[in-house]
Structure formats: C-alpha cells, structure tokens
C-alpha cells in the first residue's frame, strides 16, 4: 500500500486561486492518512488476477478514497457528529470553518467521478466503475445510511434495521470496492459474489469499529470515540460481549466463504482479513 | 421545455427505507420548479443539430439540473447564505433540518453522475459528459466559486476578481451545459466556441441575477432577495446603473458573437437569449 499512498500524494487535487486556504483544505484530510481499507480491497482483487493493471487501478482506488473522505468530512460536521478530530487531525470545520468543510466535501465527491472519467481504462470500464461508485455511494447507499443513522439518533432500532443502516452507510462502498476490482480485471462472473462477500465484510468492519469506539481512546483511534451512546451501534444494542461474538461469527463465515473464490483471490483476501480484522477473545 | 419538466417528474430519485422523510426531501427542490436554464441551453444545442437525440439528451439535461439543484441546497445552508426560501418553497433545512439539507445535496451531487452513467448514449459520449460536468461543477469550477464567494463576504474584491468568482460559481456550469449539448451531437468543432459563449452568457446571467436581487421582492423571485449587501455582487461593486449598462454591453457582444455559429444554432440561441435575458433601459 506504500505505492498507493505515494500515488495519492502525487495526485492531490490542485486548485489555485485568490482563496488563501481552499487548496490546503482540499488536501488536508487526504494527506492525513487513514486505513485505506477500500483501496486495499480493490487493489487486492486486481493483484489477484492481473498485477499488470495495478498502476491503472490506483486511479480507481484513489477515486473511492476521495468519496470515502468526503463522507467523513460531512459526517463530522457540527450538524451531524460534530467531531473535533479525524485521522489524528482537527476536523476541517475546526481547522478552517464550516463553510470550508461543506465545500471541500462537495468538491471531493464530484472529484471522485472526474478521476474515474480519466482513469486509464476503456470507456466501457470507466462507465461501469462510475455507475458502481455512484449507486453504492449515493442516495440508495452511503448517503441513505448516514440519513438513517442521523434520523434515528436517540431512537433505538431493531437489530434488523441496524443492519440495513450499516449495510448502506458502510458495507455497500466496501462491497463496491471489491466489485470495482473485478470490473477492472474483467471478471464479471466473480463480481457479484465479491460484492456479497463485501457486504458481510463491511458489516464486520462496522461492528469492529463500534467495538473500538468503546474500547479505544480518541488518541488511539485518531477520532472522537465513546461517542456512540445515542447512536444505533451494534454495541449499544447488543452490548459489548454479544457484539464481539457477532463479529467472531461473521469472521468465521467469511473465512468459510473464502473457499468459494479462485486460489489467487483467496490468498489476497486472506491477507486483507488478517491485516484489517481483529479476533475477539 | 414542458417535455423536460415531465421527464424530470417521471425520473425523480427513488429511495424507500425506514427513514420517514428522506424520499420526500430528495424530491422537494427538484419538483419545486426553477428556470431550468441549464437544461434549456443543452437541449437547444441538441435541437439545432439533431432533434432525434432530444429524448436521450433529456437524461443529460436532468443530470445538470441535479447538480445545480444540489448546489442551491448547499448554498442556502445556515453556514452559507442561511436562506429560508428557494424556488418559492421553504428551503430544506427549514422544512426538514440541516442534516437533511446536507445529505440531500450530497445525494443529488452523486446522483447526477449516476444518471449520466446510464444516459442512452455510447460509453465514449458518457465519459466525455461526466468529465465535463465534474470538471466544471467541482473543485476548479462551481465549488471553487462558492468558496471564494463565502470567503470574501464583507471583503470587497476588485472587478477582475469578481469576474473570476462568478465565472467559477455560475458561468462554468452554464458553459458546460452548452458544450455537453455539442458532445451529444458529436460537434467537437463547435464545442469550444460554445463553451466560450457560455462563459460570457453565464456572467451576464449572474449580473442580471444581482440586479434582480435589488429590484425584486423575495415573493417575486421565489428566493431571499436584498441579501447581497455583504457579497461581492456586480451591483454592490459597480452600482445598479453601471451593472445594468455592463449587462447591456455583454448582451450586445453575445448578439454579435451569435453570427459565428451555424444558422441552426443561431436561431436556437437567439430564442434562449430572448427568453432568459432582459434588456435594461
């Protein structure tokens, strides 16, 4: 992932104008690091089937990271989570102001599609990638999830509806990252099963995030923690122990489902699980 | 434009979920009407060269209107213009809440690219359209303009910089609307001169908007007026009389530049100028 990090730094958005802080604000949260989980997923699929396409795939991984980063910036706004800290840095509305945070988010959202429209693949592939990112990151995906999350603050949901919330808010973009890898390497047959695997992986990733929210300090996490009490998190609804065992069950299921994939993909996805997923004892 | 209005109503975003007001909020500002100036521009170019493509072009006109509508929703937010009224209706943050206004804006931004990715044209055309909309509607276009506008509130700019502001905030999307029409009909030769014409037309449109801000009531305009005092509008900097004569000069220039276009396009654009541009006496 070092190469991806370098690619990102080499391709930061550039906007020079009379505005004295806009350029800096555009780049701040991108440069601040992060787990780069979604890029790692996409690149693992490409690496499994056709490592020669990795250079081009980084453009696409970057586009996904742009969309994800805009969503973090907007989620942190005063009207939503009002978070002071993200990726170990002051959030944009704290470092600059609320206008800047809204507009930088807007700009990165749009920019993700500009990057895809210029990715070094055929127009056929580009259009599929754009459709996938837009449909999973938009009004029936990530944005819907955030809308449900905010609306039902302080209104406990049933476990079934919490799953719907987090499938939209988190899992769909994670699933899309895997599927977009399959689109790049032209493996249409595996794209749906990768997507389904990604939805489950996304849920697991979210439960893990909810667990870390109550077990990590803000300093360790690089963002505001212990902040989910009024939220429909898996921990607030299931309790910590049950959330941990739910996470373990999902991790076991994913390990079994790995068997359905081609050998090359199985290896790549195992590495991802090892790197990003904790087992709870 | 009746057909476009019907197309828009038939293709409103659909998102059914446990969220009780999200679906309604997604559609509210789209259904509320508006001048539909950008769709009219695009459709006029398509009508000039190939009316058979008008049905497909409406998808593209709709995508531009989605992006424009998201920008109005975000511009009206409490952190920006804090406007209570838009298109004759209460703004989303008034009718619902701030979270809803932010998220509906985000959703419509992303949705505009989803609509383009599904527009009934070749992938080659789709990718060009997406690139054009993203590059003019994003971080070096509309969003930059809004960032400059907000940053320099209560800080008077030079006329030259006000032009830069409004070229980005307003004119680039208007210019892109014309150019995207040329892309649809495959007239690459005319696309740059249409874009340049659109930049000038966009500036004129903005000056006219600034004039209406001081001469119309909120009720007449369907949005908050007399609200530009602290803004870098053409009227606050030039005064009303000079802004009006500046508008007349631009209108004269555009009328002359019309001569450079093919006859079919000249007629279409004349109709647009007559319909959307006022002459000031």
Image (cartoon, coloured by chain):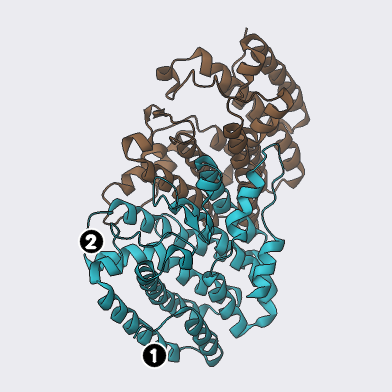
Chain colours: A brown, B cyan
Left or right? Give the position of A54 relative to B165.
Answer: right
Expressed as whole percent of the image width and height from the top left, the position of residue A230 reads 55, 22
| A132, above or below A244, in the image | below
Residue B256's disc number:
1
Whole-angstrom CA distance, mark 1 to mark 2, is 30 Å
Query: Quick one: A264 or B36, which is closer to the camera?
Result: B36
Q: Which quarter of the figure is the C terminus of chain A placed in?
A: top right
Can residue B109 be seen from the camera position used here?
yes
The chain that hosts pointer 2 is B
Using the image, name the chain to which the residue with label 1 belongs.
B
> For residue B157, which numbered disc appears in the image?
2
* Residue B268 locus on image (x, y percent): 55, 85
Q: Is residue A48 visible?
A: no
Please name the residue shown 64% across and 82% down the image. Answer: B50
Disc 1 is placed on an element classified as: helix
- Residue at x 38%, y 70% (from the top left corner): B206
Q: Secondary structure at mark 2?
A: loop
- Is residue A272 left or right of A59 when viewed as pictured? right
Q: Position of residue B107 (x, y in %)?
A: 58, 48
Of tags 1 and 2, the one toward the viewer is 2
Is B193 located above or below residue B121 in the figure?
below
């Amino acid at each position: 992932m070092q190469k991806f990090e370098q690619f990102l730094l080499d391709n930061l958005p550039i906007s020079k104008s009379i505005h004295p802080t806009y350029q800096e604000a555009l780049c701040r949260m991108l440069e601040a690091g992060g787990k780069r989980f979604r890029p790692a997923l996409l690149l693992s699929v490409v690496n499994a089937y056709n490592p020669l396409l990795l250079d081009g795939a980084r453009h696409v991984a970057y586009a996904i990271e742009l969309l994800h980063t805009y969503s973090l910036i907007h989620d942190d706004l005063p009207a939503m989570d009002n978070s002071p800290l993200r990726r170990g840095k002051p959030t944009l509305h704290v470092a600059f102001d609320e206008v800047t945070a809204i507009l930088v988010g807007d700009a990165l959202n749009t920019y993700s599609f500009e990057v895809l429209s210029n990715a070094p693949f055929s127009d056929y592939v580009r259009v599929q990638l754009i459709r996938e990112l837009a449909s999973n990151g938009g009004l029936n995906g990530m944005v819907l999830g955030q809308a449900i999350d905010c609306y039902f603050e302080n209104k406990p949901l049933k476990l079934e509806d919490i799953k719907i919330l987090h499938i939209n808010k988190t899992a769909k973009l994670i699933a899309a990252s895997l599927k977009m890898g399959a689109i790049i390497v032209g493996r249409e047959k595996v794209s749906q099963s990768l997507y389904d695997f990604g939805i489950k992986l996304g849920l697991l990733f979210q439960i893990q995030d909810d667990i870390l929210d109550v077990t990590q300090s803000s300093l360790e996490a690089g963002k505001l923690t212990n902040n989910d009490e009024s939220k429909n998190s898996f921990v607030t609804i299931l309790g910590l122990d049950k959330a941990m065992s739910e996470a373990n069950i999902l991790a076991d299921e994913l390990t079994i489902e790995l068997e359905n994939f081609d050998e090359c993909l199985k290896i790549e996805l195992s590495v991802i699980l090892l790197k990003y997923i904790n087992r709870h004892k």
